[in-house]
Amino acid sequence: MTPAPVLLITGASRGIGAATARLAAQRGWDVVINYARDAAAAQAVAAEVRAAGQRALVLQADVAHEDQVLAMYARIDAEWGRLGGLVNNAGIVDRQARLDEMGSARLQRMMAVNVVGALVVAREAVRRMSTRHGGAGGAIVNVSSAAARLGSPAMYVDYAASKGAIDTFTHGLAIELAAEGVRVNAVRPGITDTDIHADSGDAERAFKLAGIIPMQRPGRADEVAAAIVWLLSAEASYTTGAIVDVAGGR
């Protein structure tokens, strides 16, 4: 029997990452569930992956720390072998504020997790999947945000800027790897009903802003996951460098 393909999802203990883990398992992926802090939540997602008939491996790593990322990949290499896909989902937001109210520690942490962390995680995936390195190919999906287009003024322009960097990174890496068997795409969620809004200081933000969304409601994590898992699949075999908006028309 051919072994199931292995998918690493960063930030998979909640929200879009968790929804992607559940759906990917239903589509036949074995899932590596990365988390930064909430081990219990990560284990609960792993239980759902196993209930779908797939293997789950739970690994803690803060993507802002390269040594933790390298240790995570070493565990994957040793325990599961070849990586077939990556969902670069780990990311943070901070309290709503104007730029002139933000300290440098906040800005540095935002970029360390959302940009540098994403690049380092992707770099290690490329070293394993690219045919240039002896790999058998694979797919990377970066999780961006509609904030990259909208700028998030007076809320979190730092977060928006970090996601703008992810869009540019997606485009460049897709071209870089196009002849090496690795497809690179991104999904840009709009306002989505996940726990991340509580991190910005307003847990009900997604529903309060429903009126500015053409579809008049926030998105669901499973709706974003559906786009991510499609981009990972063979059905998207001729798609690379794409950025898919899942934003209710906004």
Image (spheres, rainbow, N blue to C red):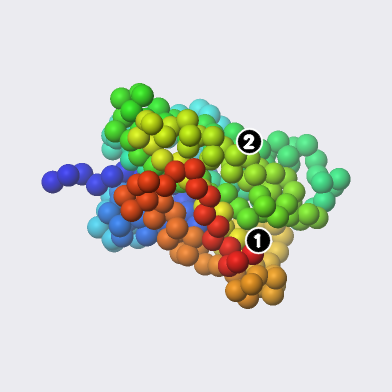
Mark 1 Cα within 10 Å, few/some/many (few <14, many 20+)? Answer: some
Mark 2 Cα within 10 Å, few/some/many (few <14, many 20+)? Answer: some
Toward which corner of the image does residue 213 lie, by quadrant? Answer: bottom right
Picture disc at residue 133: none
Q: Residue sitting at 55 percent across and 57 percent down?
A: 245
Residue type of the residue flagged with mark 2: Ala
Residue type of the residue flagged with mark 1: Ala
| Element assignment for label 1 | helix
Which residue in the structure is indicated by mark 2?
112
Where residue 246 sits in the image (x, y, percent)?
A: 54, 61
Where residue 207 sits in the image (x, y, percent)?
A: 65, 72
Give me the C-alpha separation between circle 1 and circle 2.
21 Å
Question: Would residue 56 be visible to someone looking at this image?
Answer: no
Q: How many marks?
A: 2
Could you tell me if the residues under marks 1 and 2 are in contact, i.e. CB atoms within 8 Å?
no
Toward which corner of the image does residue 189 lie, by quadrant? Answer: bottom right
Question: Would residue 146 be visible to someone looking at this image?
Answer: yes
Where residue 141 sits in the image (x, y, percent)?
A: 46, 46
Name above or below for residue 121 compared with residue 161.
above
Q: Is residue 120 left or right of residue 80?
A: right
Picture disc at residue 198: 1
| Element assignment for label 2 | helix
Judge by depth and name the residue closer to the eye, 91 or 2.
2
Name above or below for residue 131 compared with residue 148.
above
Q: Residue sitting at 75 percent across and 49 percent down?
A: 157
